[in-house]
Image (spheres, rainbow, N blue to C red):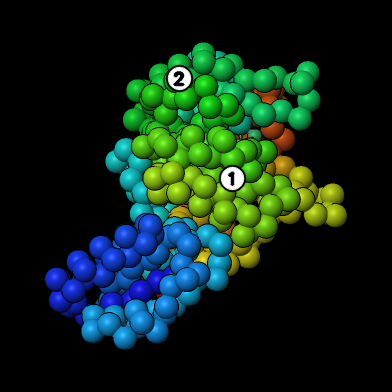
Amino acid sequence: MIIILKANPDPAQLEALIAWLKAKNLEIHASEGESHKILGLVGDTSAMDVDLIAALDIVESVRRVQEPYKKANRKFQPNDTVIKVANTQVGGGNLTIMAGPCSVESEEQILEVARAVKKSGATMLRGGAFKPRTSPYSFQGKGVEGLRLLSLAKKDTGLPIVTELMEIHQLEYFEDVDVIQVGARNMQNFNLLKEVGKQNKPVLLKRGMSATIEELLMSAEYIMSEGNEQVILCERGIRTFETATRNTLDLSAIPVLKKLTHLPIIIDPSHATGKAELVPPMAIAAAAAGADGLLIEVHNDPQHALCDGSQSLRPDVFDDLAKKLFKVHEVISKF
Ligand code: PEP
Ligand code: MN
């Protein structure tokens, strides 16, 4: 349920209303709309008398929220969430570019890629240390050593780090990590979601490969309901009958999510397409459709990459793409 207050509500009456709602065991999520303050109520509101609240002097209107996600709902918070990561911001009209290899492989590799993507204008360095691989015989990532190498690259370039957390206990190694990634395969690992919800760090939540948009938002709600409201959503392609691409990039998720939620939306055209040649056109399309950013795999030697080489861009190709993305974003921002 949301309560839209009249402009400049009487402070004493507002305080009394909030106290009354809290006494009913409701959590109150207050935010500023364009001209009115909004109180979003989280909890069981089924027995609340809408007409009674709507009749109060300070109340403009009351609406029930049908969607099962509340804190992530744009009705609760009309303004876009802007998430601060080191000295950059995600959302609010900024174009975030997270770039780097699928997995951290060596000091030379991560430093070379980090320096290159930084030069091209990337705002964050991505790289997997703990890798969720389909086959147990594939390279599983360098683990804690990978995190150490990411920290080295962060120190060298100043780029904040985004990397995947696969298990709760790995959090003890994540002190220097700026954004915790929850991968597609863990989108509904509810214990993991609750745990990252207790952290004071932004979370990049990737859409599960067969998850609906509502399920993605419910997973964001899990994180937010624990207190961490710094959630960045990521569309990375979904499973369809199509086999020409690794997954099918759901670009319509951008305008759909923009309507339903205030959280920023990042597009990952690398895992969505699985093919390097398809990454630039789809990245550009995502920027044109209003994405808040891109997540792009870049490798200094894709042919010999230990993971996802076929979808990784060479640094020179990434450089060219980044230039185009900033141009598209500039045009879109003027619409
Ligand atoms: C990744 O970004 O490294 C990754 C494994 O992606 P996803 O979880 O989307 O498959
Ligand atoms: Mn990958």
Secondary element at tag 2: helix
Q: Tell me where residue 155 sits by quadrant.
A: top left
Point 71% across, 47% down: residue: 209
**Kind of residue indicated by mark 2:** Tyr
Point 63% across, 65% down: residue: 252
Q: Left or right of 39: which side holds 246?
A: right
Q: Dividing the image into 4 quarters, which one contains the C terminus?
A: bottom left
Picture quarter with ligand 2: top right
Residue 274 position, x and y percent, is 72, 42
Q: Mark 1 points at which residue?
A: 206
Q: Left or right of 295: which side holds 244?
A: right
Residue 137 position, x and y percent, is 78, 18
Secondary element at tag 1: strand
On screen, residue 51 above or below 323: below
Q: Is residue 256 visible?
A: yes
Looking at marks 2 and 1 on the same chain, the residue that comes earlier in the sequence is marked by: 2
- The answer to which of 13 and 141 lies nearer the viewer is 13
Q: Tell me where residue 226 sits by quadrant.
A: top left
| Circle 1 Cα neighbour tier, 10 Å, few/some/many (<14 / 14–19 / ≥20) | many
**Kind of residue indicated by mark 1:** Lys
- The answer to which of 30 and 326 lies nearer the viewer is 30
Q: Dividing the image into 4 quarters, which one contains the N terminus?
A: bottom left
Q: Left or right of 6: which side holds 295?
A: right
Q: How far apart are marks 2 and 1 (CA)?
A: 21 Å
Q: Mark 2 points at which residue?
A: 173
Q: Tell me where residue 138 sits by quadrant.
A: top right
